[in-house]
Each structure stands twice: as C-alpha cells, then as structure tokens.
Image (cartoon, helix red, strand yellow):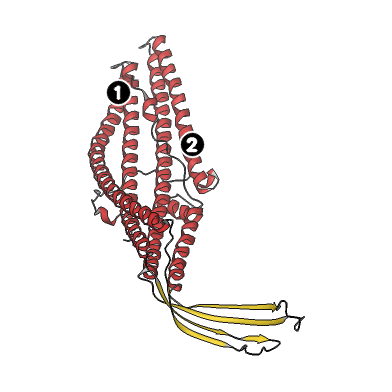
C-alpha cells in the first residue's frame, strides 16, 4: 500500500511574513508588510545616509582649516629683583591652513568614500532582496502546507466514502466481517496523517506570523494557489550586473584605492598658511618689542616613522587588494554556476509538472472508477484503498513540485538582483 506519510514530509522553511490585510493575502501583500515591519530595512536606510555623509566628510578635508588659541602667562626674571610681580602676558593666535597638494591622498579619500557609498547601497539592495526572498519562501511554504492539509482532509473523506460503500456490500452479504475491520483500520490510519498535516500547517503559519510579528489569526487567510497561470521560463542574465558580483567588484576597487593611499602616504603635504598673533602685556621692556605679528607663507610637511609603520601598512593593503581580486573571481564563478543550476532545475521541474498533472488527472479518474467497481463487487477493498492513496499522493507530489518551482524562481530573483559598480 502506498504511504501517504512519506509524501507529507515536505518543506520546512524558517520564518518570515507580514501582516494585516482584509481578504485573502497575496504574495505582494506579504512582501509589502515584510518591508514595512522589518527592522533591518530601516537600518539599511540609515546606513545609506551615513555613507553619503562620509563623502561630504572626505571632501571637507580639501577646504581650509581655521585654528584659534589663547594663552595667559606670567614671566619671572630670576634673580632680578626689580620686577617682583613678574611680567603678565596675554596672547591669542588665529591661523588658517589650506592644503595645496597632497600627492593624491585627498582625492583618493573622496574616491574611497564614494566606493563605500556604492557598497553600502548594494548591501541595502541585497538586504532588501533577502527580506523579500524570505517573505516569499515562508508565504509559499504556508500555502503548500495548507494545500497538504486540504488534501489530507479529502483523503479522510474519501476513506469514509469507501467505508460507506463497504457497509453497503456487507448488508448485501457480499463481503465478510474481516474486510469490514480492515476498512475501519484504513480509515483510522488516515487520522494520524491528517494530524501530521495539521501540525505542519500550524508550524508554517507560526513561522509566518513570527516573521511579521503578528498574531497567527491575521496571516492564516493566505492564497493557496502555487501554480502560475502561464509559467515563464527563467532567463539567464549577465552575472557582472548581479548585486553580489557588483559588490565584490567595488570591494576590489576600494582595496586598490586603499593600496594607493598607503603608497601616497610616503609623500609630503604642501600647504599655504596665514596667521595673526596679537599680544597684550602689562609692561614694556627696553630692547624688547612687544607687538602684534602676522605671517603668511608655504609649509611642506613630511613624516616618515623610522619603525616602518608605513611600510607594513602598505604591505597589508597590498594583500587586501590581492584577496579582493581573488574574492571577485570566486563570487563571479559561483554566481554563474548557481544561475545555470537554478535554470536547469526549473526546466526539469516544469517538464515534471506536466507529467504529474496528467498522473493526478488519471489517478482521480481511476479512483472514481474503482469506487464504483467496489460497490459492484468487481474489485477488492485493498485495490480501492490503493487507488485512493495513489490519487492523494499524486496531489501532494504536484503541490510539492509547484512549491519547488516557486522556491527556485525566488532564489533566482534574489541572485539576479542588480547592483551598481
């Protein structure tokens, strides 16, 4: 006898889905609710704003720096006794420094900030795609389990119909009491399967409601249709446009900029400066000019730590650049492989679905004929039960195949999310 329980053990997906809409919840409703209620979605918006501020911060280093300070001091001349109170001096200084040439360090800093902004935006796209992907997976998992529950309920109903047909034959003396007991046992065996399907559906709804942070009652009215009206074949796209590949390419560009910055850090900085120093003292000394001063000029700053800090930093950035290039190759290769695999799997399941649909149609027809034949005494009770279970298992196989098609399409949509590079 065919086993229904093996077919019911199908997909267990971790939780996600969104909220409260009147009527039947569609896929778009769930996605909208997930994006509105998920905290990660709000975090990504803040990260984008932060990355744009970093660009402004990097550009700000190109503008002048204004510094001001003030000092108060007392000077005592020792062992001079004529000035027992000392010389009080109050002074302030205002200076303005404008970088003129930094050998590319400032422009590289701006470039790095822009690349960081692109990476942040790509990460945001990837995060949103993951939320949408998880929402869809949980939605269709719940729809699948709801279908399985409906099929299990129909199976139990069919078993009761079989029992009624058997009772008719018993009343006409066409079958012995042992066969009647077997039929009762068959009906009883469907109840654990129905319980298993019920628990599977409840678990899927719990995952959905937990993801959306909503009561189960608000997400249980979901659309159970897993089949597309006209399934569109999956299309292969250029992997270089995928957000994960684009991000790996941006990471490579960022590592190149960081390596260049480490090399440029050996060079000096040329700046223009201007300063004004007013002086206020409570006495004047013979031969000492106590007056305000102003300066303007150019300054060349050069720094070379003798411990080799800059040398080691450059080596570190070179290794980072090599690793980023290797990672780009890896991500691109894996994306290409995954895309081809998903498209091939989907094509296989599409062809398989045609066969399963035909099998379901024939199995349902076979069961109706078998039920009539059983009433007439043409077939045994075992043949009737096998016929009904065949129809039930084919229905579950069809739902399972449609679910796998949905999950593959969802996975490919996430993979093919486009990013900026």
Q: Position of residue 382 (x, y in %)?
A: 33, 16
Where does label 2 land, which residue?
Answer: 203
Q: Position of residue 54 (x, y in %)?
A: 45, 66
Residue 244 appears in the picture as rendered: no
Classed neighbour count for the residue bearing mark 2: other residues with Cα under 10 Å, few (<14), some (14–19), many (≥20): some
Foreground residue among 251 and 40: 251
Residue at 62 percent across and 88 percent down: it is 288
Residue 321 vertical position relative to residue 73 in the rendered view, above or below: above
Classed neighbour count for the residue bearing mark 1: other residues with Cα under 10 Å, few (<14), some (14–19), many (≥20): many
Foreground residue among 64 and 231: 64
Q: Which mark is residue 64?
A: none
Pointer 2 or 1: first along the chain: 2
Residue 307 vertical position relative to residue 284 in the rendered view, above or below: above
Circle 1 — which element?
Answer: helix
Residue 18 appears in the picture as rendered: yes
> In 3D space, how far apart are the residues under numbered discs 2 and 1 (Cα atoms)?
35 Å
Residue at 34 percent across and 47 percent down: it is 410
Side (left or right) of 335 relative to 83: left
Residue 377 vertical position relative to residue 193 in the rendered view, above or below: above
Residue 90 vertical position relative to residue 394 in the rendered view, above or below: below
Q: Position of residue 307 (x, y in %)?
A: 44, 56
Which picture quadrant has residue 304? bottom left
Where does label 1 land, which residue?
Answer: 370
């Amino acid at each position: 006898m065919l086993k229904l329980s093996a077919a019911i053990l199908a997909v267990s997906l971790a939780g996600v889905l969104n909220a409260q809409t009147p009527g039947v919840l569609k896929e778009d409703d769930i996605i909208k609710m997930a994006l509105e209620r998920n905290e990660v979605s709000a975090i990504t918006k803040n990260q984008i704003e932060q990355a744009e501020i970093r660009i402004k911060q990097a550009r700000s280093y190109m503008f002048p720096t204004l510094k001001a300070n003030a000092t108060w001091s007392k000077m005592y001349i020792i062992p001079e006794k004529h000035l027992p109170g000392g010389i009080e001096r109050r002074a302030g200084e205002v200076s303005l420094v404008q970088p003129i040439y930094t050998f590319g360090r400032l422009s590289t800093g701006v470039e790095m900030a822009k690349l960081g902004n692109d990476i942040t935006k790509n990460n945001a796209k990837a995060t949103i795609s993951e939320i949408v992907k998880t929402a869809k997976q949980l939605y269709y998992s719940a729809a699948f389990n709801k279908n399985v529950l409906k099929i299990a309920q129909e199976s139990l109903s069919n078993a009761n119909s079989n029992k009624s047909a058997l009772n008719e034959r018993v009343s006409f003396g066409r079958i012995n009491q042992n066969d009647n007991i077997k039929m009762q046992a068959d009906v009883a065996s469907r109840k654990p399967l129905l319980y298993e399907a019920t628990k599977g559906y409840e678990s899927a709804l719990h995952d959905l409601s937990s993801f959306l942070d909503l009561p189960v009652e608000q997400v249980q009215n979901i659309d159970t249709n897993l089949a597309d009206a006209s399934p569109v074949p999956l299309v292969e796209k250029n992997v270089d446009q995928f957000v994960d590949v684009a991000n790996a390419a941006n990471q490579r560009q960022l590592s190149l900029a960081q390596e260049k910055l480490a090399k440029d850090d050996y060079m000096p900085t040329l700046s223009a400066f201007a300063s004004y120093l007013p002086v206020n003292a409570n006495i004047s000394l013979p031969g000492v000019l106590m007056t305000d001063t102003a300066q303007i000029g150019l300054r060349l700053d050069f720094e070379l730590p003798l411990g080799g800090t800059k040398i080691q930093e450059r080596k570190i950035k070179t290794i980072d650049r090599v690793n980023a290039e290797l990672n780009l190759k890896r991500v691109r290769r894996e994306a290409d492989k995954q895309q081809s695999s998903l498209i091939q799997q989907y094509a296989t399941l599409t062809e398989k679905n045609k066969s399963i649909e035909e099998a379901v149609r024939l199995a349902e027809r076979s069961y109706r004929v078998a039920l009539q034949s059983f009433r007439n005494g043409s077939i045994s009770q075992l043949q009737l039960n096998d016929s009904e279970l065949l129809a039930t298992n084919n229905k579950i196989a069809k739902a399972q195949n449609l679910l796998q098609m949905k999950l593959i399409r969802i996975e490919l949509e996430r993979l093919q999310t486009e990013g900026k590079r």
